[in-house]
Image: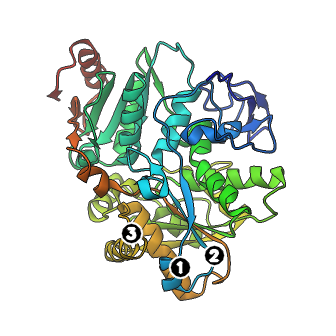
Amino acid sequence: MSFKGTKYHLESLCCRKKIEDTGVCLRCPGDEIPALLRAIYDVKQINIDNGLKGIYKFADWLPIQRLLRGSASPVTYKSTSLAKHLGLTNLYVTFSGFWPEKGAFMKSGSFKECEAFSVCARMPFDSGKTLVVASAGNTARAFARICSDNEIPVVIVIPEDNIKALWFDSPLRDCVKIIASAKGSDYFDAIFLSNVICQMNGFMAEGGAFNVARRDGMGTTVLSAATTIGSIPEYYFQAVGSGTGAIAAWEANLRLLEDGRFGSTKMKLMLSQNLPFVPMAEAWDNHSRTLPPMTDQEARDMVEIIDAKVLSNRRPPYSLKGGLYDAMCDAGGAFYRVTNEKAKEAAQLFENLEGNDVDIAASVAVASLIEAVEKGDVDKDAIIMLNITGGGGNRLKQSCVPYFKKPDLVFSIEATEAEVHAGVEKMIIDSLTYHI
């Protein structure tokens, strides 16, 4: 069907300047302090267009120019078994992943598809550049699948220790290249490496939290919940690594308030991290905009310990204008610190009671909900949204022969910019796999 693109403009959260979007704009050129941009949509009351497939039914509030193949949408349902177990009367699960019985068909098994389908649909049709995406795992899998299916050139940078996350239901097209930072590195090392690649001609940064399409894509989880429930939830539970998903939830909440048809609630952001990697939890508990200091090695050592390695961003968008600190100050909320053991127990409980597997990051969120109920942090009759950001991976693997993508390049942590540039140039030329 014909799609003319969503009407919107960008606004700087620092100077409130109005900016016309190019499809790749990440920052306001006049901002003197770090700040996010926000998409301001012409349509103030969202129309859910079920004639558009998957996530694009929320197109009114997505900054997109086109529609891509293969999109799926988050699904929200009212829990019975888990809710009964916890003594909750209004627990709603928003599920992003693979669960055919619930109508969930995300091939990557993760809500990172919401980001990828939005980001890639925002990009200009003929930019002539290759997208560069840094990831700790789930984002890599989502962007690789979407870019392969839609023939969009992309370079994905991931820590080699997380490479097992790159499984797919079928081989990828050659437009997808995988570059890894060597064993012992973490997500921040992958981000640094991606920034070096973006200095080269012909490459452009995806932008992470600075990309309005990434945030608004993830915000569709809240749109799914509110439009299913008929009102804005009172509590929002999610495990966070960068906190971008929680920022996105807050921004979606603000749009729903402006819409006027879903009540006047600001959801409390009930967030969680995987012990011992809890920098945002420590900062919030100390009422601080500033994250606690950690050395590169301290961060890598903690990442070695945690099971939910996708929750390991040591430079998250927490402190900047419009970031997670501002979101939590405005909406209220709390941080929970979840051990590997508690996350595993929560994953098993969810599967036993609800009937589907969830990934390790989502299990951290489930564990935080259990803790919040035990502590009396939530009213048992409140409307609660549990954001299951990934699940159904085991079912997906059972339904196909998993294809594991090996990196096309692996760079040591000590690799120089010149070595990286030379290696990437050679990879693009001959697509050979080798190590530096």
> Which residue, given by chain and number where applicable, does mark 2 sit on?
90
Name the element at disc 2. loop
Q: Is residue 252 above or below residue 205?
A: below
> Which residue, given by chain and number where applicable, does mark 3 sit on?
355
Q: Quadrant of residue 8?
A: top right
On the rendered structure, is 162 left or right of 30?
A: left
Structural distance between the alpha carbons of marks 1 and 2: 7 Å
- Residue 428, x across and y down, in percent: 28, 16
Identified by mark 1, the residue type is Ala
On the rendered structure, is 192 left or right of 102?
A: left
Structural distance between the alpha carbons of marks 3 and 2: 19 Å
Identified by mark 2, the residue type is Asn
Name the element at disc 1. helix
- Mark yes or no: residue 312 visible: no
Q: Say whether marks 1 and 2 touch (CB < 8 Å).
A: yes
Name the element at disc 3. loop
On the rendered structure, is 404 left or right of 202?
A: left
- Residue 114, x across and y down, in percent: 52, 43
Identified by mark 3, the residue type is Gly
Q: For the N terminus, which image quadrant? A: top right
> Which residue, given by chain and number where applicable, does mark 1 sit on?
83
